[in-house]
Amino acid sequence: MNHPSQAARYVADQERAHWHDNVIWFMREKRDQAVNVIPEWEELRELGARIKGHTLSRLDDYLERFESQAKQLGVQIHWALDAEEHNQIVAGILQAAGARKVVKSKSMLTEECHLNQFLQERNIQVTDTDLGERIVQLRQEAPSHIITPAIHIKHEEVAELFHEHFGTDLSASDPDQLVAVARDALRRTFIEADAAITGVNFAVAETGGFVVCTNEGNVDMGTGLPRLHIACMGIEKVIPRIKDLGVFLRLLARSSTGQPITVYTSHFHGPAAGGELHLVIVDNGRSQLLQKRKFNKALNCIRCGACMNTCPVYRRSGGHSYGYTIPGPIGSVLGPSRKLKQFYSLPYASSLCGSCTAVCPVKIDLHHQLLEWRKEIAGAGILPWTKRFTMKVASLVLRNTWLYRTSGWIARVMLRRLPRAVVYHRLNLWGRQRDFPRIPDTSFRQWYAQRNHEQQK
Amino acid sequence: MNSKNKILASIRKQPVREISLPDSNGFGIRYEDPLGQFENMLERVGGVALRVADQAQIAETLESIEVYRSAKWVLNGVPGVQRDNPDEVPVGDPRALEQLDVAVLPGELMVAENGAIWVSTENVKHRVVYVIAEHLILVVDAQQIVHNLHEAYDRLSFEQVQYGLFISGPSKTADIAATLVKGAQGARSLHVLLVGPPPPTPER
């Protein structure tokens, strides 16, 4: 896995890359509008960050409190150390209930655990019910964005996909028509489902309840029909009090799509009459991340997607180029915490401009963490030799005044005289899509010295 | 050691940096005309607000709504309105609600900031009714309004409420080419009837 090579493949289709950039930037603009009408926005972010910080500092207490409260509501609690155990638990519950058809509402955790594949291998049919998730599921792809999973796909391509799977007309490619097709197809699936699996946005220690946010209503359709509901949550989803929802729900929707709140904010405090409600609490590497002082703030994340919407690299390279379940700046700090070698290139998929940090509703120090990861990666010696070598050379030149001046002089003279083919060759990655600026006649040092000299006259 | 204890033991190895839990009491934006703000926001999120002078006018207002007039099956949970009562409907299995055209149900509390209405299982037999109906009409006492979500959570109680929901507009999606489309999986439209006189404007 290597971000630059995947991204290169993505930007080769220039028209699509520009389209993606614009679509994603539109979400960032909507976020700004939604945030600017709230005068206390910065205080709200501070509240969110402090509540998360507090919760993480005594996460064990809050999880135990949550468990005991939830049990009193009749919720059955399960704990999973890793993805494998999570999948085993979910499959076990479904098999015990004889469930064959399952509807799932968007949950990045079950993506992270590759639950769908696990269940399908056990003859349990899983249908993703969030429209974007359904589209990527039919295309046998992973989501490319955590809020709008199919944002990389154009509506004509969705029309082709639906034509193939539902036999609809190819010309019916308006988003309106396509949504109507998906609605009808999904309604059948909901009616036939034996069980529902959902994610969790917030779990409340005080009451033992949990909240899931959607715009489509698929969580409520999914959980409202079959008698079995399994909710899966990472350990970092717990918050102390019911009133903290006021803070996080205000932060979440405004930051992610620029809505004042999601259309449906569903509060579950126990199973439906005659139903069963299970909750699987998953670690899968999170408690290890919690132990890393420099990086544990990443667990503040409420999965709004604002950091990717604003990121110049994400917008131009698309979510799939990251090769991790969660793309963008937050994915680039979470990926390496999991598998350093596999995801070493992600912290470099950033210009360190700091825009992600500026929009993050829970104040994760994203661009600082990206830089910290680069130090860890360099220290671990897993950078490719090209990068190591250039860094060595740069360090040597920048430390030595004479060498610095001489190489500057050589560059100025040579870049002007050498034929284009010699400068823009295969190894000049930087020059692949752009030209060097015009080379000045004098160096800054020369210009500065001359200016001082003239002023003294 | 079971997984729970392993996870908790691993969590306890974290570098301790105790941060106090901040309070959000009295926090949040307030509006001069909260009901007007609510109507504004509801419209922005794709819903329709209708003011109703008193209880007696509800039936008449409902008749003015096209989807209500043309509905074959209306489920009604609001006193004083004719048609089927949800508790009397012979529906044991919520799947039988699939053909439901319109649900008229009480809303408990409105939030001015975001155009959301709180509903819960206190008023219905099947929680799915809020999304499975093709069209949803909520009837709310115009006095039951708060400025923002912080105030809403101060007011709401979760004892004995297994399922509750903030609804802000009709079901929608922007998952295809980032184009906003109403009527994804849930109700295609949302009307909110604001019944009775608006809350008095606070003295300044």
Image: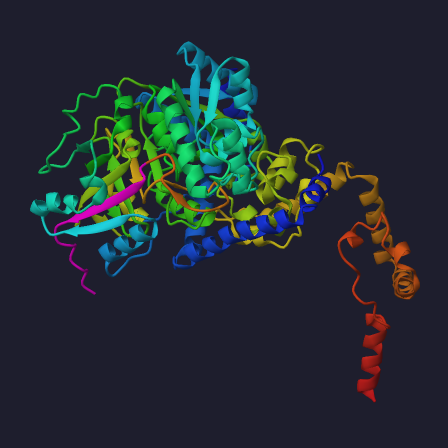
Q: Can residue B107 be seen in this view?
A: no
Looking at the image, is A227 positioned above or below residue A9?
above
Rendering quarter of residue A33 = bottom left
Looking at the image, is B95 positioned above or below residue B109?
above
Q: Pick the residue in front: B127 or B175.
A: B175
Name the quarter where the C terminus of chain A is drawn: bottom right
Looking at the image, residue A280 sits to the left or right of residue B137; the answer is: right
- Say how many tags the image has: 0
Looking at the image, residue A59 sits to the left or right of residue A373; the answer is: left
Q: Pick the residue in front: A101 or A375.
A: A101
Way the structure is coloured = rainbow
Q: At 16% across and 54% down in the image, what residue appears?
A: B198
| Residue B199 within the segment the image draws in magenta | yes
Q: Residue furthest left?
A: B56
Q: Could you say where residue A251 lies in the image, as x and y percent from the top left?
A: 42, 47
How would you classify the magenta stretch by its main secondary structure?
loop
Q: Could you say where residue A385 lies in the image, as x and y percent from the top left?
A: 83, 40
Q: At 51% across and 49% down in the image, what residue appears?
A: A360
Q: Is residue B115 visible?
A: yes
Q: At 51% across and 36% down in the image, what residue appears?
A: A170
Q: Could you say where residue A124 lies in the image, as x and y percent from the top left?
A: 48, 15
Name the quarter where the N terminus of chain A is drawn: top right
| Residue B72 within the segment the image draws in magenta | no
Looking at the image, is A79 positioned above or below residue B111?
above
Q: Pick the residue in front: A181 or A18.
A: A181
Q: Could you say where residue A60 lies in the image, as x and y percent from the top left?
A: 46, 29
Q: What residue range appears in magenta? A: B187-204
Rendering quarter of residue B29 = bottom left
